[in-house]
Image: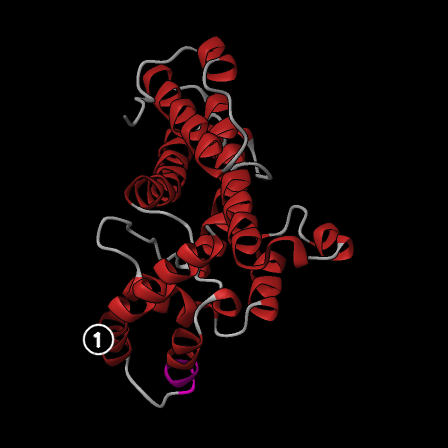
Amino acid sequence: MIPSFEDRQPEQIITDSNYFESSGRIYKALSWLDYAKRNTNVSALEYAALETRLGIEQLLFEQLVVGVGSEIEQQEYKKCKGNAKVLDQILKRLIPKYEKLVDFTRALAPDNIPISKWDNHRLIQYSGKVSTYLHWSGGLDTTVQSEKWFANGIQTVQEAANYVWETLTKGNTAVMNIEDSPLEIQDLWEQYSGGQTTLESAASRAEILEPILQERLTNAGKGRS
């Protein structure tokens, strides 16, 4: 069940369901946004912007961990702190053809396991936009005391947080581990990623292969018993 972020009080926001992965961060962001709108509270808007930015950074980091796992060296981890753009660059460097791999994973995944495809360029843009409401500059009359500034802030942070929340609640962040896949699937990936076949063709061939691969897996299990 997806929790409601409406009508929560500050004490509830910082104590109840206080998780620090991307979904927890965005849940708090939306809760602060709701409080900010109900009370015209600038501090709540700032908290929402902070949680949204942290949620985006955490989400990019989660994509990195899902795709690379324990292969990331400690030095790489240190580079990941607090910079959405650097996180995306590391993701693309450590997982070549990352976006194609997500498409391949989605095409071969069972229908009952929805896989989300994140627009990381969009996430990076959102991270920059919401940061405007953390590092604002200008006169008080044009910023924190301005109704227009406040309304624009609500809209900006809301758009970013909604994108992440809606995508998180509709699918999973996952990519296939090609190296651990059957050789036939590895071959399909090489052909698709190399432009030798279409995604639709690769998915159709994988569907044809499924009974064979399943039988092999079953026989391997019997052999171990």
State which region is magenta: 190-194
Identity of the residue drawn at 54% across and 73% down: 96
Identity of the residue drawn at 31% across and 64% down: 215
Identity of the residue drawn at 35% across and 69% down: 104
Q: Main secondary structure of the magenta part?
A: helix
Asked if residue 76 is among those painted magenta in the image, a careful observer would answer: no
Q: Is residue 140 above or below residue 199?
A: above
Q: Quadrant of the N terminus?
A: top left
Q: Is residue 101 above or below residue 224?
A: below
Element under disc 1:
helix
Is 220 displayed left or right of 107 in the figure? right
Query: Quick one: label 1, few (<14), some, or many (20+) residues within 10 Å?
Result: few
- Nearest the camera: 10 or 134? 10
Q: What percent of the width, then of the height, locates residue 209? A: 27, 73
- Nearest the camera: 82 or 35? 82
Rendered image quadrant of residue 191: bottom left
Residue on which disc 1 sits: 204
- Nearest the camera: 46 or 75? 75
Identity of the residue drawn at 43% across and 35% down: 23
- Count how many numbered circles sit on residues in the image: 1
Q: Is residue 132 visible?
A: no
Q: What percent of the width, then of the height, locates residue 111? A: 22, 54
Q: Is residue 101 visible?
A: yes
Q: What percent of the width, then of the height, locates residue 99? A: 42, 68
The colour scheme of the drawn protein is secondary structure
Q: What percent of the width, then of the height, locates residue 148? A: 37, 34
Residue farthest toward the right in the current orientation of the protein: 75
Residue farthest toward the bottom in the current orientation of the protein: 196
Asked if residue 191 is among those painted magenta in the image, a careful observer would answer: yes
Amino acid type for the residue under numbered disc 1: Ser
Is 70 displayed left or right of 12 in the figure? right
